[in-house]
Image (cartoon, rainbow, N blue to C red):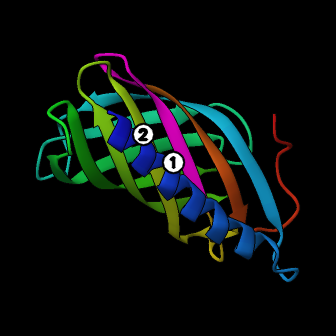
Amino acid sequence: MQRTVSAAIAGLMIGLGSLSARASDDSQTCTAVNTPITASFFVEGCASPFGLCTAGVIPSGLLTGTTLFTVLTLQPGETEEMLLYTGEFVISTFYGDVVIHDQGALNSLDGTFFEFDEIVSGTGKFSNASGTLFSQGVSTGTGFDSTISGQICGTPDEGPILD
């Protein structure tokens, strides 16, 4: 577990460094994100090769809307209880969609997880979006309760007020 925590911290520092570099570019507007997400597992229509998908809701902030997560890779971590995964995470809002490449680690013993979420594309208001978000939370047995935070850059100033 210590190695996993150390790796997560190292990865977080690398992610924050690239995020800071992007945020310092004066030509882009960056918006802070810090909001809860709840998601439930579903099977019918799930495109994951592992049959692991979630659909959820972000109730507040710039990313208010629905979510769809599809696990694309799944492998064991450094310890028996750790699972490493990647996936596609799509957030659909009134202003457009945000498509994210997700990399995470799940502790199968206590259900906790941590993810790095790189914005790779978007539509509408998010068509020029970039940034790195971080998500962490816990498995509820039927889905996940978590928080997503970070910054989205390249979006217009107008929009909902963040909670």
**Which residue is rendered at x = 44% and y = 40% of the image?**
114
The quadrant of the image that shows the C terminus is top right
> Is any part of residue 154 visible from this angle?
no
In the image, residue 125 lies at what x, y percent? 70, 67
Residue closest to the far front: 2
Q: Is residue 146 left or right of residue 41?
A: right
Q: Amino acid at mark 2?
A: Val
Q: Is residue 83 left or right of residue 126?
A: left
Depth check: give the residue in front, 120 or 7: 7
Q: Is residue 53 left or right of residue 136?
A: left
* Mark 2, secondary structure of its residue: helix
Specify start and end residues of the magenta stretch as a single range.
132-144
Q: Residues within 10 Å of mark 1 (few under 14, many from 20)?
A: few
Residue placed under numbered mark 1 in the picture? 9
Residue placed under numbered mark 2 in the picture? 5
> Is any part of residue 75 visible from this angle?
yes
In the image, residue 160 lies at what x, y percent? 82, 46
**Which residue is rendered at x = 35% and y = 42% of the image?**
4
Q: Are marks 2 and 1 in contact (CB under 8 Å)?
A: yes
- Mark pair 2, 1: CA separation: 6 Å
Q: Main secondary structure of the magenta part?
A: strand
* Mark 1, secondary structure of its residue: helix
The quadrant of the image that shows the N terminus is top left
In the image, residue 65 lies at what x, y percent? 59, 41
Q: Amino acid at mark 1?
A: Ile
**Which residue is rendered at x = 31% and y = 35% of the image?**
106
**Which residue is rendered at x = 63% and y = 71% of the image?**
18
Residue 115 in the magenta stretch? The answer is: no
